[in-house]
Amino acid sequence: MKSLIYLPQCSSTNDEIIDFINLSHLEEDFLAIYTFNQTNGRGQYGNKWKILANENLAFSFAIKTQKISCSDILFNYYTAILVRDFIANLTKTEVKIKWPNDLILKNKKICGMLFEKKGNYLVSGIGINILQENFENLPKAGSILSQTNLKFDLKNFAESLYHYISEKLMTENIPENILELYNQNLYKKNTISVFEKDKVRQNGIIQNADNNGFLWIELENDGLQKFFHKEIELLY
C-alpha cells in the first residue's frame, strides 16, 4: 500500500515523514509527503536547503527496507538516478548527477537530496528548484525554469514525480547495474576539473564513484585517491 500527502506548509518534509514513522503504526509500504512552502529544510550532512514559497518543491518519501534489495549506498544512488531520469525526460534536457546526490542542469544545481534510515524505513528528502528565477548570492544554483525556460504546474509535477518513483520502486525490480548507471550520468566524469582539498586547489579528473560511497579522483599532484563527502570540493 502507498499514499501521498500534501502539506500547505511545513518545517521539513523529512521531519514530517519521520514523525509519521515514529508516532504512528504505518501500514504503508511507501509514503510520500510534499509541500511548496518548506520553512526549515535539511540537506545532506547538516546543510540547509532553502526554498522560496510556491516556486519550488520539497518532497520526501519513506519506503520499507524489506522492499529494497540493494545496499543503502546503492539505494541512494538509485534514487538520484530516478529523479535525474524523471527531470531529464520531462525537460528533454541532459541532467547530470554531481556526487553524491545533487542534480546539475546546464551547469547549475537544481536539486539536492537527503537520505536517512529510521526504524524499518529508508527516507529520502528531495528538494527541486522548479519556478524560481532569482538566485542572488547563489551563483551555483538554478531552477528548471531558469535553465530551460520551461514552466511546470507544481502540483502536477509533484504528483507525477510520486507516481514515477513509487512505480519504479514498488512494482519494478531494482536493476543490478545501479553503479554503472550512476557513473554513466556522473557530472564532470573523465573531464579535467578544479578541486579544492585542505584549502589547496589542483586539477583532477573524476574516475568513478564506488559502491561504498567513495569518489575516485586522479589528482594532478596527489595521484589517484578516494574521497568521502566533504573531504574534497569540486569547483564549478
Image (spheres, rainbow, N blue to C red):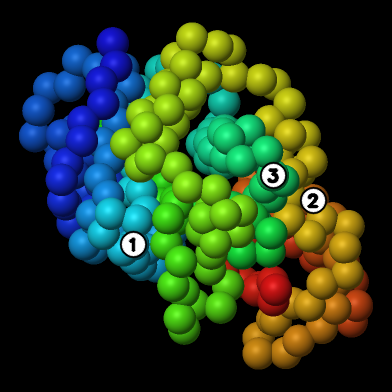
Badge 2 element: strand
Q: Nearer the viewer, mark 1 or mark 3?
A: 3
Badge 1 element: loop
Asked whether residue 125 appears in the rendered view, the answer is no
Report whether 48 appears left or right of 236.
left
Q: Quadrant of the N terminus?
A: top left
Residue at (61%, 53%) from the top-left corner? 148
Residue at (89%, 81%) from the top-left corner? 221
Res 212 → quadrant: top right
Res 51 → quadrant: bottom left
Give the CA distance from mark 2 to mark 1. Answer: 31 Å
Measuring from the top left, give residue 59's x and y in whole percent.
Answer: 34, 42
Label tally? 3
Q: Nearer the viewer, mark 3 or mark 2?
A: 3
First in residue order: circle 2 vs circle 1: 1
Neighbourhood count class around disc 1 (C-alpha, 10 Å): few under 14, some 14–19, many 20 upward: many
Measuring from the top left, give residue 168's x and y in whole percent.
Answer: 52, 19
Q: Nearer the viewer, mark 2 or mark 1?
A: 1
Considering only vertical position in the picture, is 202 above or below 102? below
Q: Amino acid at mark 3?
A: Thr
Q: Amino acid at mark 2?
A: Asn
First in residue order: circle 3 vs circle 2: 3
Neighbourhood count class around disc 2 (C-alpha, 10 Å): few under 14, some 14–19, many 20 upward: many
First in residue order: circle 1 vs circle 3: 1
Residue at (88%, 57%) from the top-left corner? 190
Q: Which mark is residue 93?
A: 3
Residue at (60%, 59%) from the top-left corner? 147
Q: Which mark is residue 208?
A: 2
Q: Amino acid at mark 1?
A: Ile
Residue placed most toward the observer, 44 or 41: 41
Considering only vertical position in the picture, is 172 above or below 57? above
Task: Give the residue pinned by disc 1.
Answer: 51
